[in-house]
Each structure stands twice: as structure tokens, then as C-alpha cells.
Amino acid sequence: MERLRIEPLTAEAFRPFGDLIDVLGAPTKLINAGLCGRHHDLARLSFDDEGRAGISLFEAQARALPYVLDLVERHPLGSQAFLPLDGVPFLVCVAEDAGGVPVRVRAFLTAPGQGVNILRNVWHGVLAPIGAPGRYAVVDRIGPGANLEEYPLPVPLRVEG
């Protein structure tokens, strides 16, 4: 089993795979008579013409580090955004694609309250809250068609902090 080290999660480091969703800096604009700050348009949501955006609630079982990553998946027809409801950090493993095969896997750990949007067709691990169960609002594609591809890793990775 190979080792994979967790990297710091920054918008720049994650950009090839998606978007870091976080309240950073001042709000983009104030709304509701100045009583609410809006951090506007934080994710590059993308869906094919036959799908639409939907909001689902996920309940994920707790995982621990070190974590064994043995399966990745991707969604060719739409992006997938994960917004934590409980503030539980979660592991985000992503990989580049080389002819339909995931390569150069990277691992990130969110801070409490951070979310991510994973772009269409990006290989990623399953939802893995670390240390406690987590609930998530997930914005992804709802519609016909095969929007899930899974790839068992021939050599599992041991993800470490």
C-alpha cells in the first residue's frame, strides 16, 4: 500500500479539481438592508442539458486517519458541491484523468465549515467526514443518464495527515 500525504486545502491548490467554498474576506455585497453579507457565486456549477441542479441531504458515517482509499468515482454529467451542515472536517481525495484512468491522486482536509465543489468528470473519493458523522447539503445534477463511474484503485492508498 502506498502512502498519500494530506496537503493544505487552498483555493489555488484545489482549482484544477473544483472550488473551495468558504467565507474568506469581506462579503461580495450586503443585502437585507445591510444586515446580511453575501459571498456571491463561489462555485463553478455545471450540468449537461438534460439535467438540472438539485439539493440533497447526505448523512455520512465517520472515518478516521489514516484512511484507506481504494475506490474513486466521477460524475461526467454534472458537478457536485458538498456543504457541511455540522462543521465536521472531511477528507477530499481527487485525481487527474489519463485516458479514463485516475492518476496523481491528491488528498485535502477541509477546515470546519468549508465546503467544496467538484467539477464534472473529476475523479474523487467518497464522502469521508473525519472523527464524527457528518451531514451535508449536496448540490448536484438530477436527471436521466449515467452520471456515475467508479474505479477501484489497483493499489490502495493510505491517506495520512
Image (cartoon, helix red, strand yellow):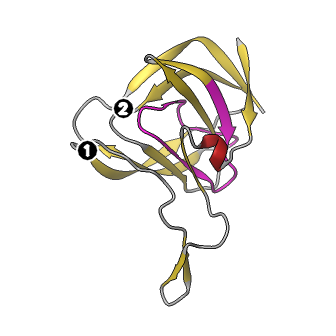
Q: Nearer the viewer, residue 94 or 99?
A: 99
User: Residue 122, image x and y in percent?
Assistant: 47, 32
User: Could you tell me if residue 66 is visible in this image?
Assistant: no
User: Quick one: label 2, few (<14), some, or many (20+) residues within 10 Å?
Assistant: some
User: Residue 67, image x and y in percent?
Assistant: 68, 27
Give me the residue at 46% from left, 40% from top. 119
As measured in the structure, the alpha-carbon distance from the residue carrying label 1 to the one carrying label 2 is 12 Å
Q: Is residue 112 left or right of residue 115?
A: right
* Amino acid marked by disc 2: Pro
Give me the residue at 47% from left, 62% from top. 41
In the rendered image, the vertical position of residue 41 relative to residue 158, given as above or below = below
5 in magenta: no
User: Could you tell me if residue 68 is visible in this image?
Assistant: yes
Q: Is residue 150 left or right of residue 38?
A: left
Q: Nearer the viewer, residue 69 or 94?
A: 94
Under circle 1, the secondary element is: loop
Nearer the N terminus, badge 1 or badge 2?
1
> Which quadrant is the C terminus positioned in?
top right
User: Residue 134, image x and y in percent?
Assistant: 58, 47
* Amino acid marked by disc 1: Gly
Q: Which residues are magenta?
A: 105-131
For disc 2, the marked residue is 76
